[in-house]
Image: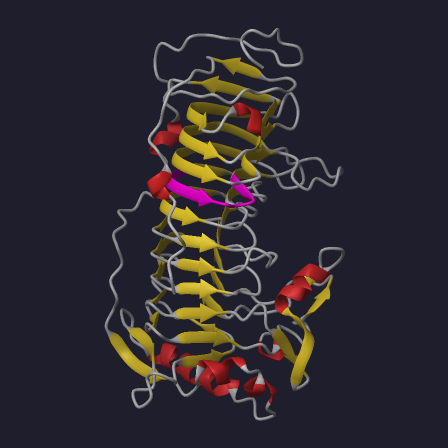
Amino acid sequence: MSSAQQPSVLRIFVASLAVLLVCAASSAQDTRKVVEPVLPPTCVTLTSVFTPASATSGEIESRTTRSVAEDTRRIQQALDHCAKGHAVELAPDPANAAAKTAFLSGPIQLRAGVTLLIDKSVTLFASRNPQDYEISNSSCGLVSDAPSGCHPLITAKNATGSAIMGDGVIDGQGGATIIADGKPSAKSWWDLAEEARTAGRQQVPRLIETDLTDDFTLYRITLRNSPNFHVSYHRGDGLTVWGVKIDTPRTARNTDGIDPSQSRNITITHTYIRTGDDDIAIKAGDGPTTNVSVLDNHFYSGHGMSIGSETNGGVSQILVRSLTLDGPDNGLRIKSNPTRGGLVEDVLYDDVCIRDSKNPIVFDTAYSFPGKGVALYPVYKNITLRNVRISGGGKLQFNGFDHAHRIGVTLDGVLLLDGASRYKAQAIHTDLTFGPGPANPVFTGDDSTILGKQRPGSLPACAANFVPFPAP
């Protein structure tokens, strides 16, 4: 609605802002002093016995001798006996380094203070046999209503100070057919995710899952083709993700990149992520998540930089700075609903470039709301968008739940770079503040207020921020 129009459903209160309204989110960050990790010394080096072709053929999982168990055993045994502060190194076969560069493993567990180090040119492939992951008999590799039926490929539980590092790759083989009863089946892990759209849960393994593990580090590693979430960090204090690449097709359902939950002191930096679901999703389902810094990252396909949908434990003190989103389904997103909602506050998005997204900004309090079980109302407040530049059209939506459960957001430099006519901007049950930076979105909606006003201006250009996904 322009200033020349009379307000109808949008109640507007216009006031000039004489001073900068400083949001508490401006100081939100990981409270640790985070520096670039360093590779630890090696305690033992394991060499490959497989070529990538043999490791991905399915023949190994099909053998009755279950040869995949040998790599699993020797990696686990090395981790169990490695001294803290050292690494188990996965390396090519020195006698045939050009060919034998693959490992094939079932579930392994990291140990406190020990690093799994994967050399450049080496790939750790995940077994495609559901029996390797099953928690109980026949619980993995199907769609059912049961709780989780599969162990992750890599688990870190009570493993403080553990890490995964190196310039190699961990490949979950999510798109390859499952090996069932000694032969390839008709379905992949990702096919099970699609099958579960209508009913049930896909019983498939995550790639990396931590629990009760502080000071966990991922450094320089490439993660790809996870059957489900790539990284789930739960109930921890201190997560560092530095220089990591996550590479999985946009069509692979439920393949979140990095999901911190019920945790604090998190830094994710210098990452490149393209995947089939949330690139990052900050969650708080069973406790608060706070003090999170997401700095200098590039996202491509996926559902963008998300908070939620589980926010009932409370999310606070979040800093997202220097983020480039190139072609995601969603850009900046906060999502919850009254079955899992709570307070999201003190969030600052600063220096963000978004192009070619259907939904560049979506803050939704009724995400996938079934219309019943209303008790956990989402409230988003003290949310600041600063120096955000958007191109390519799409929807900007601030959807508060009702008059009492609102969204409070400040637009301190938010520019639509290619004309407001290409965008649909809506604010419902929302309190908007404009300024002091320029902002040009024009909002319509019900039961919303505006303090300040839209004004033209300029922000630093984004062209140099959009770079191709790094080559393997």
Along the line of sight, which residue is nearer the eye, 324 or 363? Answer: 324
Along the line of sight, which residue is nearer the eye, 378 or 324? Answer: 324
Whether 328 is among the magenta residues is: yes
Q: Where, by quadrant of the figure, is residue 50 drawn?
A: bottom left
On the rendered structure, is 360 left or right of 349? right
Give percent across and percent down for residue 127: 54, 77
Task: Residue at 56%, 48% (x, y): give it.
Answer: 286
Along the line of sight, which residue is nearer the eye, 104 or 201? Answer: 104
Give percent across and percent down for residue 29: 35, 40
Give percent across and percent down for residue 376: 64, 36
Q: How many tags in the picture?
A: 0
Q: Where, by quadrant of the figure, is residue 140 drawn?
A: bottom right
| Looking at the image, residue 341 lies above or below residue 154 | above
Q: Where, by quadrant of the figure, is residue 194 drawn?
A: bottom right
- Residue 224 visible in the picture: yes
Dominant SS of magenta comes to strand
In the current view of this chain or complex, which residue is farthest to the bottom? 65
Q: Which residues are magenta?
A: 318-331
Give percent across and percent down for residue 255: 56, 58
User: Tell me, what colour scheme is on the image?
Assistant: secondary structure
Task: Residue at 30%, 90% (x, y): give it.
Answer: 95
Task: Residue at 41%, 34% (x, y): give it.
Answer: 349
Along the line of sight, which residue is nearer the eye, 411 or 80? Answer: 411
On the rendered structure, is 130 left or right of 99? right
- Residue 212 visible in the picture: no
Please state, as top left, top right, bottom left or bottom right, where the N terminus lies in the image.
Answer: top right
Whether 153 is among the magenta residues is: no
Please state, as top left, top right, bottom left or bottom right, where the C terminus lies in the image.
Answer: bottom left
Task: Residue at 33%, 88% (x, y): give it.
Answer: 96
On the rendered structure, is 83 left or right of 376? left
